[in-house]
Amino acid sequence: MYENLRISNFRGIDELNIDELSRINLFVGANNSGKTSVLEALFLLSGAGNPRLPTSINSFRSLKFVSDNVWRSFFNRMNVSSPIVVNGLEDAVGKKLSISAIADTSDLGEADSHSPNDSDSSSQAGSKATSESSIVGLDLLYEEVDSQAIRRTRSQVFQEKRDVRTRVVEGKVEPKRALFTNDLTITYSEIALRLERMLVDKKDQVLIDVARKLDSSVSGFVLGANGTIFVDTGLSKMLPVQLLGNGMVKLLVVNLNAYEARNGMLLIDEIDNGLHHSSLGLLWKSLIRSTINYDVQIVATTHSYECIKALVDSSEGESVRNMIRVFRTEIADDNINVKVFDRDALTRFIEREWEVR
């Protein structure tokens, strides 16, 4: 589990220190206050230098092409003369990702080709970039340090003619399991694959229990042809799950994703999208259960006061209360700052109807 995070020169973030990360973390704040960028930084750091991830996080924002300006947009104020640096401490292992701009590809050598739509989740990287350079890609240096050793890998992603190419320059480090989700990253075919894995593992009872909170007639899920998910509601025929409403689909997806991210991290942008406020308590109770059962760390974002209140109301018992942290992102002096609140502090603020939008 990540305990802290340090981000510099990334997106709208100049310098940001986040301490006291816990098992369930919710980032709140106005639009363009850095919430999604924090999730992206964690996703990149967890990827252990995977060169496909920068274009993946852009595709999560529906940005599916690359150009000089797109490469520059990773850097705060497009300042490519300084690297992006993301540091984190996870289970006594220090992790650091440094990302520098590549100004030319003349000496990069062999590489693999991929589309910028693809998602996965010590040598010089071309010429040193300056504000006048034409930026063609990114160089990623990832390092892990613990009491036993230092592990390092270096990789690159860059545009060459019409293709986006990647290459590993040196080393290889096993990435942390991490899943980034928003309304743009999930397709019904992916949902079906994740349900299939859960059914094979005989872990689908949690889905049934959650679904019954919305519709007491639900008794199970099955996969049909072409990845269609059917739900048994006691009628003469099963129904496609979409016919039970967006709320049912949203809860199904969130819990499938929690299982997919087991023993790792689940990053959820705009967690309450598609849910009526009356279902938010059910959402959090199911995620609290998942984080315990599947050993998954959850980091999510919201604009919603109701979402925060539902989290507080759902966190009963001292052990669960200690798992909860809410971080409020704010813009001050053209930089993004963050304030952290535990469950008890949140309760006091909610009594004053704390404004989060």
Image: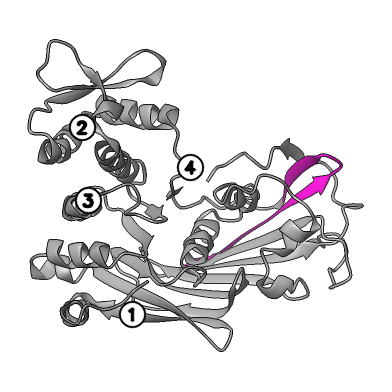
**Could you give the CA–CA distance between mark 3 and mark 4, rounded to whole angstroms?**
19 Å
Relative to 271, 306 lies left or right: left
Please report the bounds of the magenta region as a residue range: 148-168
Q: Is residue 111 visible?
A: no
Query: What amino acid is labelled 4 in the image?
Result: Thr
**Where is mark 4, residue-wise?**
185
Query: What amino acid is labelled 1 in the image?
Result: Val
Residue contact at pointers 4 and 1, CB within 8 angstroms: no
Q: Residue 136: which quarter of the image?
A: bottom right
**Could you give the CA–CA distance between mark 3 and mark 1, rounded to whole angstroms?**
22 Å
Closest to the observer, 312 or 267: 312
- Secondary structure, mark 1, is strand
Closest to the observer, 345 or 277: 277
Relative to 142, 110 lies left or right: right
In the image, residue 32 lies at what x, y percent?
A: 52, 69
- Residue at left 52%, top 59%? 40
**Where is mark 3, residue-wise?**
283
Relative to 105, 324 lies left or right: left
In the picture shown, does residue 193 fall above or below 316?
above
Q: State the quadrant of the C terminus.
A: bottom left
- Residue at left 45%, top 33%? 187
